[in-house]
Amino acid sequence: MVRNRSPKHKLSRREGKDLFGTGGASLQRRLEQPPGLHGRKPGRHRESEYNRQLREKQKVKRMYGMHETQFLRFFSIARRQRGITGLTLLRLLERRLDNVIYRLGLARSRPQARQFVSHGLVTVDGKKVNIPSFLVLPGQEIGMKDNAMKIPDVMELREAKPPVPGWLEPGNQGGVVLREPNREEIDSDIEEQRIVEFYSR
């Protein structure tokens, strides 16, 4: 699978958002300045609508750790389904197995959650699934294997008990997908309509 090997901080600064949840305070201080020796040059700079659409698509694609072919496939699925295409796309992205692990508070970031899945530490309805893009359905139970629960990061997160969105029900070693997420339960700074417009050109 093709992965973008650019430094995560650089990609986050380009989009003005901590895309990977791994940056900490040092990155937060630098998000206002785009990558490069001097950041964005002063003077008149009017961003085109095409560029805004492209940047939004790139931001969301990187947030969920996907390459272009896979992201386009998800968009194509969303466009074929009934309902609002942008919201349907976000719901599909949220139901990715690696994202569900992250949302359940069992990983510090989506990249870490993806690693847990790829290493065979995650189960769906009791069966091992090692495909991060696996789409979890409402009613399915997600679990972490016993050895995964002994990973220091996982143990610390269980102690901290981070908030879990209402579409998921956390359990002892995982959780259950109750329903599709509502829009307000997904990142509010995503402008999904721009992604729809980008692919509809």
Image: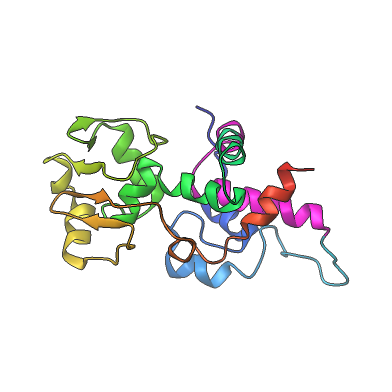
Magenta highlight range: 48-72
Position of residue 156 measured from the top left corner of the image (x, y, whole percent): 19, 60
Residue 97 position by quadrant: top left
* Residue at figure coordinates x 60%, y 40% from the top left: 75
109 or 23, which is in the foreground?
109
66 or 169, which is in the foreground?
169
**Residue 62 forms part of the magenta stretch:** yes
Q: Is residue 45 left or right of residue 142?
A: right
Residue sitting farthest toward the front: 82
Position of residue 95 measured from the top left corner of the image (x, y, whole percent): 40, 45
Relative to 28, residue 124 above or below: above
**Residue 200 forms part of the magenta stretch:** no
The answer to whether one can see residue 7 in this image is no
Q: How many badges with numbers are in the image?
A: 0
167 or 101, which is in the foreground?
167
* Residue at figure coordinates x 59%, y 54% from the top left: 10
Relative to 135, residue 24 above or below: below
Magenta segment's dominant SS is helix
Relative to 184, residue 115 above or below: above
Position of residue 168 measured from the top left corner of the image (x, y, whole percent): 29, 56
* Residue at figure coordinates x 68%, y 48% from the top left: 196
Position of residue 178 measured from the top left corner of the image (x, y, whole percent): 29, 52
